[in-house]
Image (cartoon, helix red, strand yellow):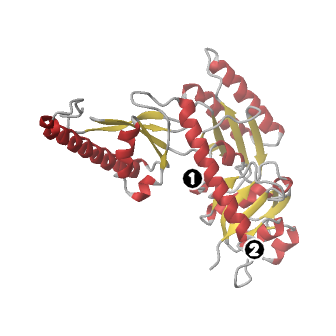
């Protein structure tokens, strides 16, 4: 997950209200349900010590979601009476809406709820051209079309020698249209930044388009068994996206396991103990933060200063480093803050396997 969009959260001091709102239950009484949720979240924040202005800002923002088309939910991060960031969620918050008041924004749930939302371009291919559709957890919309040569496109069943010239024209038309579709699909991927491409249509038509794609685009193509004329259902797209996320997660996990072994210079490129992670964060050496959401170290307190790289396992360590003002914060939130401000990424690993990330936190490192 690219953490750049979280930068506004780390440009201001805390404390912060972090609220995750479930908007998945759309019904005639949605406005009333959100009104009740808004009041409940405001009460929860007040009970945790939040100031009145911030509670009111959060309550108002939740009320305003009655006008939103959000399918799953919304996160709200507020301080000093204003909502600073309100990302849309790609998954419903488990257990319903929840609120936190803490020195740092409670951002770890975003790794599960908004972190992996691969964008998919579905190309419905036929002999005459193709229609493109952009699909993700949050949207479904047309993404363009391409029309090839319209005649001739169908082969005849005759085996007469007089038909050979016509058959050659048919083959040439197919090849021309496949090349046109491949070119347009390449442009569509570049413009949308899609993570995946799915070709839907007759197997031969799909193959001809696939063969004409640049190699870097071919690597993004996911296979589907749907034939000509069918439309890809939401469940089909979700399966393609889920498989893509699983492959990427497996690749990261494989890199992490390999990086725990010292290289030729005796350096390890992965750490998973909290003291080592804190040291790597202070030295700006985290390349990718890995989080197992149920790990015990996520809840442990570390000490943080005003800057993202001011963190320590013990408060006395910060004072030794020259930081006079410090607060206790959750380890996961402190490490995500450090990762976001040093251009590192983060990823949730829900099933890393036995003996991997025993504390729930780890990182792939960068070395100068």
In this rendering, would 224 be left or right of 93? left
Q: Quadrant of the C terminus?
A: bottom right
Q: Identify whether 72 is placed above or below 111.
A: above
Quarter location, residue 123 = top left
Which mark is first along the chain, 1 or 2?
1
Q: Secondary structure at mark 1?
A: helix
Q: Which residue is mark 2?
A: 261
Q: Spatial distance from mark 2 to mark 1, Cα to Cα?
A: 33 Å
| Circle nearer the viewer, 2 or 1 | 2
Quarter location, residue 253 = bottom right
Determine if residue 307 is in view. Answer: no
In this rendering, would 137 be left or right of 163? right
Q: Residues within 10 Å of mark 2 (few under 14, many from 20)?
A: few
Q: Position of residue 208 (x, y in %)?
A: 34, 46
**Tags 2 and 1 touching, CB below 8 Å:** no
Going 60% across and 39% down the picture, which residue do you hit?
90
Q: Identify whether 98 is placed above or below 328.
A: above
Quarter location, residue 326 = bottom right
Going 67% across and 65% down the picture, which residue do you hit?
255
Going 34% across and 50% down the picture, which residue do you hit?
187
Query: Which of the two residues, 271 or 244, is positioned nearer the viewer here?
Result: 244
Q: Report the label total.
A: 2
Q: Quadrant of the N terminus?
A: bottom right
Q: Residues within 10 Å of mark 1 (few under 14, many from 20)?
A: few
Going 71% across and 70% down the picture, which residue do you hit?
259
Q: Which residue is mark 1?
A: 5
**Which residue ends up furthest to the left in the rendered image?**
162
In this rendering, would 272 be left or right of 35? right
């Amino acid at each position: 997950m690219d953490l750049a969009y979280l930068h506004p959260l780390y440009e201001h001091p805390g404390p912060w209200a972090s609220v995750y709102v479930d908007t998945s239950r759309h019904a005639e009484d949605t406005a009333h349900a959100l009104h009740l949720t808004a009041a409940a979240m405001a009460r929860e924040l007040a009970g945790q010590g939040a100031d009145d202005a911030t509670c009111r800002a959060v309550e108002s923002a939740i009320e305003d979601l009655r006008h939103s088309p959000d399918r799953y939910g919304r996160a709200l991060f507020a301080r000093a009476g204003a909502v600073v960031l309100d990302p849309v969620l790609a998954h419903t918050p488990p257990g319903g809406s929840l609120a936190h008041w803490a020195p740092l924004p409670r951002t770890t749930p975003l790794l599960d709820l908004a972190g992996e939302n691969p964008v998919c371009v579905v190309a419905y291919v036929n002999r005459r051209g193709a229609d493109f559709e952009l699909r993700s957890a949050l949207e479904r919309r047309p993404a363009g079309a391409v029309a090839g040569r319209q005649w001739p496109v169908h082969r005849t069943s005759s085996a007469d020698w007089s038909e050979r010239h016509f058959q050659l024209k048919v083959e040439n038309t197919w090849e021309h249209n496949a090349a046109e579709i491949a070119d347009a699909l390449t442009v569509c991927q570049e413009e949308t930044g899609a993570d995946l491409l799915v070709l839907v249509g007759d197997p031969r038509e799909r193959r001809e388009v696939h063969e004409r794609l640049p190699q870097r685009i071919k690597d993004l193509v996911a296979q589907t068994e749907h034939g000509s004329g069918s439309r890809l259902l939401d469940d089909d797209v979700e399966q393609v996206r889920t498989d893509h996320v699983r492959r990427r997660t497996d690749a990261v996990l494989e890199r992490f396991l390999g990086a725990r072994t010292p290289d030729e210079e005796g350096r390890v490129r992965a750490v998973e103990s909290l003291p080592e992670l804190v040291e790597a964060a202070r030295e700006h050496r985290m390349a990718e933060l890995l989080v197992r959401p149920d790990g015990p170290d996520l809840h442990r307190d570390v000490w943080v200063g005003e800057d993202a790289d001011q963190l320590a396992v013990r408060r006395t360590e910060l004072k030794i480093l020259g930081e006079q003002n410090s607060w206790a914060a959750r380890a996961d939130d402190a490490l995500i803050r450090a990762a976001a401000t040093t251009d590192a990424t983060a990823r949730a690993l829900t099933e890393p396997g036995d003996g991997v990330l025993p504390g729930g936190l780890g990182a792939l490192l960068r070395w100068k």
